[in-house]
Image (cartoon, rainbow, N blue to C red):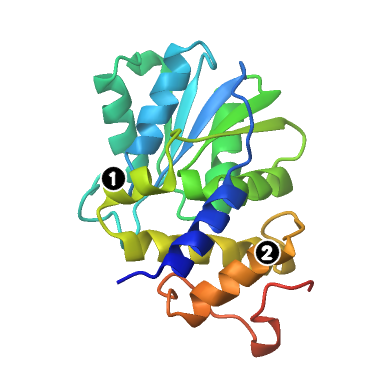
Amino acid sequence: MISAQAWADAQRLWDFQQMGHEPRPCSVAVGLGSHDLGVADATADLFHRGMAPVVLFTGATSRTTRDRMPRGEAEHYRDRAVELGVPASAILVESRAQNTGENIRFSRALLEERHVPVSSALLVSKPYEERRAYATARKIWPEIEWVSASTPMTLPEYVDSIGNARLVIDMLVGAQQRLVVYPRQGFMMEQEVPSDIVAAYERLRSSGFTSRIIPEPPERAGLGSP
């Protein structure tokens, strides 16, 4: 049973992860591979709305996707987008990346290899990872403008789509932790984390929502200023 306090704290983290960007026409739409085919759906929708002439899906497999997406996340995303009416000729596939940093680096290399001029990019991720993806992209490829996007849905709707509330909250806690830990390691840009978000994170972590937490030195385990 998940308490009312835990739900309220999860909602705080969910809202903080949303960048609030308004989709606009960009050079390319980059769909970040994951277990969630909703990313492919959102990317296809942006294409059909005329927001990008080129779609690039990036991602290999992980422990959570190797059974469901044995050919690689990006390959399965491409199949889904084609099913949704995106022409195969408009889709590029990067199938080596195994983390968000590699998603950006390898996507940039592929776009340069294919001579696709890029001044801006729609960065399509899972709803609870918009901020993390944006901070990574800005760190690794700062020369272009990034516009965050995801499937427009509420936290309860996302929980229903996944079918596992505890897992979703675990993922929110993990994403929040990375917003502070990864800048210290040079993986993403630094961002200010408001005190109410820190408190919500700490309460959820103390309540055992920790399956997506990564190891870090004890003196840096909190989410305050580094």
**Number of the front mark, 2 or 1:** 2
Question: Looking at this view, is 101 or 44 the one in front?
Answer: 44
Check residue 103 in the rendering and tell me which mark sits there, or answer none: none
Judging depth in this view, the residue of 94 and 155 nearest the camera is: 155
Q: Which residue is mark 1?
A: 161
Identify the amino acid type marked 1.
Answer: Ser
Q: Residue at x 54, y 17 (%)?
A: 52
Residue at 32%, 60% (x, y): give it: 165
Which part of the image, by quadrant, shows the N terminus?
bottom left
Q: Is residue 115 visible?
A: no
Residue lying at the far left in this picture: please name it.
67
Question: SS of the residue at dot 2?
Answer: helix
| Whole-number angstrom distance, CA of label 2 to CA of label 1 | 27 Å
Q: Position of residue 175 (x, y in %)?
A: 53, 60
Q: Indicate which disc residue 196 carries.
A: 2
Give the residue type that dot 2 points to.
Answer: Asp
Q: Is residue 129 above or below residue 75?
A: below
Q: Residue at x 75, y 56 (%)?
A: 191
Q: Is residue 1 above or below residue 221?
A: above
Earlier sequence position, callout 2 versus callout 1: 1
Q: Which element type, helix, strand or loop, lies under badge 1?
A: helix
Q: Is residue 86 left or right of residue 207?
A: left
Q: Image quarter for residue 152?
A: top left
In x, y percent, where is residue 36? 34, 45
